[in-house]
Structure formats: structure tokens, C-alpha cells
Amino acid sequence: MDSIRKKVAVVMPVRNEEAAVGPTMDAIFASTRLPDEIIIADGMSTDGTIAAIQRYGDRGVPIRVVNNPTIWAGGGRNAAIRVTDSDIIVLSDFGNTVEPGYIEEMVRPFEEDDTIDIVGGLFRMRATTHFEHCVASIHYFEDYTLDRYSRDEIRQLIPPVVFPGGLCTAFTRRIWLAAGEQPEWLAKGQDKMFSRKVHAIGGKGLVAIDARIWHHVRSTPRDLFRQLYLYGRGNGQMRFLSKHAVLLMWIYGVLALLLALGWFSPIFPALAAVLFGAYAWRAGIRKVIKVDGSLKKLRYIPVAMEVLLVRDIGSLLGHLVGWAEWIFVPRYQAHYRRYMGGLPEDRIPLIAPQLSGQSIFGRLRRVFGVA
């Protein structure tokens, strides 16, 4: 199809992120294609965030600030999109910096094919401390090593069905309307549920492999735990399981069973220790070594173990709490039914598409290498 230029809005929710305003906005204004407007959804910031944003008002792109009384990102994105008539909505988060070609590459598919509804981009990890380096190596291994993959290898990593998140996503205003906006009753995971809804109603999407952003990594164990806990809890509240959580349930379920069998024989706890050691090596320490080419610092060993345990416990606990809320707190099922009601169940996968239709036991044979 001939390329047709469309009107583009960059939408960013924000709350008390004054320090991130400069890097985030400077990156946007260094883009090879500037948006037609920038809309900020302010979640009732109490610092100098909005004043810092407004200093960019003379750069040639209109900047609008709308209130987001829900505070959550999904409600903020909805509030921002409601005030624009732009054809394409490009999402971004403060604290992440876009590469110069990001907006151009995210918008290109929509202008070349009018049937495209949603596009996801890719992200790279920015790590500056030992802890951040281990988090990026273990939890974001493919993203952290993105530059080592060829274009064909990147395409092979992308599953047939993708649910782009708010981190790097663009979509048409028409599909946002057709999907009934983003759900505002979820604290985390609104973007994923929106993507699932788009898929369920037949929306057409793809991944723009040349659209890249730099994503910040959680810098403390507490922040990492909170991130994974909240994401896992959001998944449970919207009746969803990530592939990572499924694998962790099997791994720690087997370990718990072996420890319980220790009442009958000490060989079982010993076997559990061996299996956990193998898991910690393959899923943790070995990934750091693969990123660096060797074990650059002995300190990485205990840090990698800490990252692995904090990540796993946070994700598992979050999923358990979220699913308990789904079962025992009626409002979550009620909200879900209102948002997804009437759609075919086979279009709303319970487990992330990377696992759907595949043998879980086949995945488990490789679990120590991919978890």
C-alpha cells in the first residue's frame, strides 16, 4: 500500500518523576520523526514534574497536560487519548528513553498498512550498578543482549501472537475505541489486558523490530520485588499467567515436594539442594557469565543469587495473591466480565501465548536454561 501520513500523539502517564523529565523529553525531541502532539497524564504529582515538562513547550510540538485522578497508568492513558483526535497513539513511560528512530519505526507499519491495529517495539536495558547488571542479565537476558542477535534471530524470538505492553506500544485510536479503552480497575497490567482484548476482537498486530527504547532497571532488591509482585498480582487479578510464572510454579513445586519427602529420607532434601543449585546456575549465574563472556567479578555470584530469589519470590507471591483476589474478591470477576464479556474463550488465552499449544513437559526439559 502507498504510505499515508497519519497524525501521531505520544501519550505518557507521569507521577512525581521530576528527575526523569529531562532525559525522557530530550530523547523524544531528538527523534527522527517528531509527534504531532505530546499529551501528559498527570497522576496528581506533588513535585516539580509538570513545571519541568512545561519548559519544553517552545520546542515546536504542542504539549498538553491532563489530570489523571485514577493515578494508575491505564486511567491516565485513557484520559490523554480522550482529548486527542490523533490517528496513532504511541505510548511511553517517563524514565525510559526512546532511540532516535523509535517513533518513526513504530508509526511506519500503520502508514504502510491501514489494517494494522497495534504495534509493539523492543527495549534495551540500561544497567549501571552490579545489582542492575545482574537483574538485566537474569530477568531481561534477550533484551540485554539484543545487539548480539541478527534480524532473523530476533524475528525467531517473537511468538506468533504478542500482547504488547505499555512499555513500548502504539495503536490506532479506532482500536482503542473498539476495545472499550484500557481497563482502569487494574493497578498493574492494564496494558496487557488491553492487548488481550485487541487480540480477542480480531485486532491485527506486529512487532517493529527496529523500534527500540532504553528501559531502566530496578536498582534495589525492594524495588525489584515490588515490580515483580505487582505485575504478578495484576496478572492474577485479570485471569492471566505469564510463562515465567508457570515455569517457576513447576520448579518450586518440585523443590517443595522433595523437601516434604525429607520426612521419609534425607536423600530427598539433598536432591532438592542439587536441583536448586543446578537451577541457580543455569537461570542465574550462568546468564551473567554469558553476558560478560566470563565471570568478571566474584561479587556477581551472591548478587545473582539474590536477584534470582527476589525475582522468583516476588513473581510467585504476586501471582498467588492476584489469583486469590480473582477467586475471593467478587469485583475482579465482575470487572473482567464487563470488559471481556461475550468474546470467545479461545481468543482469550489463560497462559501467555509463548506457552499456549506447547507441551509443558517439553518446556520443563529446557527449564533450567530458559527460566
Image (tube, helix red, strand yellow):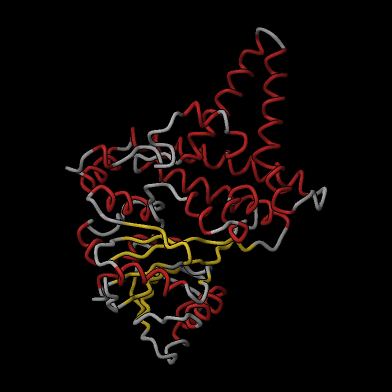
Query: Quarter of the image containing the C terminus?
Result: top right
Tell me if I can see residue 144 in this picture: no
**Which residue is depicted at the point 25% across and 75% down?**
83
Residue for point 37% across, 56% down: 191
Percent position (x, y) of residue 282?
67, 37
Residue 267 horizontal side relative to residue 81, left or right: right
Residue farthest to the top, as pictured: 264
**Which residue is nearer to you in this view: 331 or 64?**
64
x and y, in percent, of residue 156 in the image: 48, 49
- Residue lying at the far left in this picture: please name it: 342
Q: Quadrant of residue 273?
A: top right
Residue 77 shows up from this direction: yes
Residue 67 x, y percent position in the rendering = 34, 72
Relative placement, left or right, of 234 versus 294 is: left
317 above or below 364? below
For the N terminus, the image quarter is: bottom left
Where in the figure is residue 344, as x and y percent of width and height?
Answer: 21, 40
Residue visible at 69% across and 8% down in the picture: 265
Q: How many marks?
A: 0
270 above or below 111? above
Horizontally, is 87 left or right of 293 in the view?
left
